[in-house]
Image (cartoon, rainbow, N blue to C red):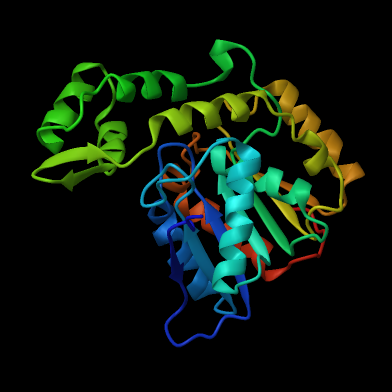
Amino acid sequence: MPVLAHQRVTHEGAVPTRWIYFLHGIFGMGTNFRGIAKSLAAAAPDWGFVLVDLRGHGASQGFAPPHDLAAAAADVEALAREIGLEIAGIAGHSFGGKVLLELLRCRSQPVDVALVLDSMPGPRDAAGQRGDAEKVLASLEAVEQPIASREAFRARLLGEGYSTAIVDWLAMNVRPEAGAYRLRLDLPAIRAMLADYFAKDLWPVVEQPTAARDMCVIVGGRSDVFGPDARARLTRAMPQNQNLRVHVLEQAGHWVHVDDPAGLLAAMTETIRKPGSGARS
């Protein structure tokens, strides 16, 4: 059974006593959050960070089906056992946020800190609610492999109307292999995981206080991931779950770590410095 690829981030000279696992979004990889993890480690050196490549992404290849949130969460638990670093905290963006919630749903003991980054816990049924993920997946599935060069890959996607920022980010997955290039993404696995991601309802994990001693849901103010109904449900959840706080980054879209890294860092630092406080922010 393969083990998830990962990197550790700690503050120079520090010996962390607790570890937070970072789970990226779909088409991403653990290193997407290296800069945020370094800043968090400097602000709270008693914490260390494990940047995970989820199954089918980055260097985490060769995982057997089923490909769903439960399997992805079980992979993270298996990684923690393999490297001997207990999951004291967990952070997840977008798809990684629902892997986080699935992991918490299955645990018998709460984590100290859970940081859900612009990841709506409920199902997203209508095509208009699913953002661009399915469109991007279809574009990637249509790319013939091996690929002649990264520039050929970039030119193709730019020609399909994707922004330079999105294309450059996706191109990080184009890696050399035997004189050509291939996507380091398991696209059939990702299609299966996306289907489960859109279908699964994990609101009960957010609404109950037993999953985490301190849970912070960080919402991009300009993101369409949390519609009015979902934001209202978050507000209603706080009296039910005294461990829950909600922080809105008003100027950020869905890519909260790109759009407002300073605001994200402040919200996350406040949470990891006061685990279990139950205080509102």
Q: Position of residue 91 (x, y in %)?
A: 60, 54
Q: Is residue 101 above or below residue 41?
A: above
- Position of 94 with respect to 125 (left or right) is left
Q: Position of residue 48 (x, y in %)?
A: 54, 73
- Whether residue 50 can be seen here: yes
Q: Residue furthest right?
A: 240
Choose top left, top right, bottom left or bottom right for residue 200: top right
- Whether residue 223 can be seen here: no
Q: Position of residue 13 (x, y in %)?
A: 45, 88
- Give the residue at x 81% y 65%: 277
- Give the residue at x 61% y 25%: 198
Q: Is residue 192 above or below residue 72?
A: above
- Give the residue at x 74% y 50%: 104
Q: Is residue 15 above or below residue 225?
A: below
Q: Is residue 44 above or below residue 69?
A: below
- Give the residue at x 65% y 70%: 86
